[in-house]
Image (cartoon, rainbow, N blue to C red):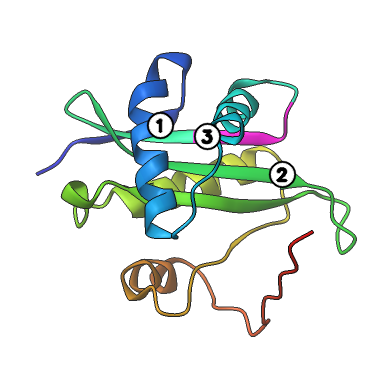
Amino acid sequence: MHDITIRQLVESDFDEWLSLWREYQNFYQVDFPAEVNAATWQRILCSDEPIYGLAAESNGKVIGFAHYVTRRSTWSLKNACYLHDLYVDRKSRGIGAATKLVQRTVTEARTGGASKLYWLTQEDNATARSIYEKLANRSNFTYYSLQL
């Protein structure tokens, strides 16, 4: 049995977070500049930013994270919450950390008064989709992106 604690990311998590953040980038075949990594971390820690971070911790080690963003909505008087990033270390997969991270994000979104929580994943990410499809309804929207 694995004891997994989900909590807010804190300043002392930086080194473990950065290592996982780089693994996450590698998974998506991106490489953010150091200034983007630093700004992301500072935004997560800043109480004036609508970006938040959760840590999945097991045996005193951060094994995963979730980043979520609250934003205004044109479809509701309440904010929406977007689960922007979710990652669990490869060696720690299959023990329920990802599910617990999503469930805690749901709790945080509800507590913050959001009308909905939503997220994206790659079509071929079968591992993540097997978890997500147990937790939420799949949308029929198609995602488009334009780099500016």
Q: CA distance from mark 1 to mark 3?
A: 12 Å
Circle 3 residues within 10 Å: few <14, some 14–19, many ≥20: many
Q: Name the residue at 78% across, 48% down.
A: 79
* Amino acid at circle 3: Gly
Dot 1 falls on a residue whose secondary structure is helix
What x and y, as percent, mark residue 41? 55, 27
Point out the tag, 3 or 2, that comes first from the N-terminus.
3
| Residue under pointer 2 | 70
Residue in front for this viewpoint, 48 or 99: 48
Foreground: disc 1 or disc 3: 1
* Amino acid at circle 1: Leu
What x and y, as percent, mark residue 147? 74, 63
Q: Is residue 51 magenta?
A: yes
Quarter of the figure with residue 33: top right
Residue 6 appearing in the image? no
Point out the tag, 1 or 2, that comes first from the N-terminus.
1
Residue 10 drawn above or below residue 25 = above
Residue 46 drawn above or below residue 140 = above
Dot 2 falls on a residue whose secondary structure is strand
Residue 11 drawn above or below residue 6 = above
Which mark identifies residue 18?
A: 1
Foreground: disc 1 or disc 2: 1
Residue 9 drawn above or below residue 120 = above
Residue 7 appearing in the image? yes
Q: Which residues are magenta?
A: 49-53
What x and y, as percent, mark residue 78? 82, 50
Which mark identifies residue 53?
A: 3
Q: CA distance from mark 1 to mark 2?
A: 22 Å
* Amino acid at circle 2: Thr
Q: Name the residue at 31% across, 70% down.
A: 127
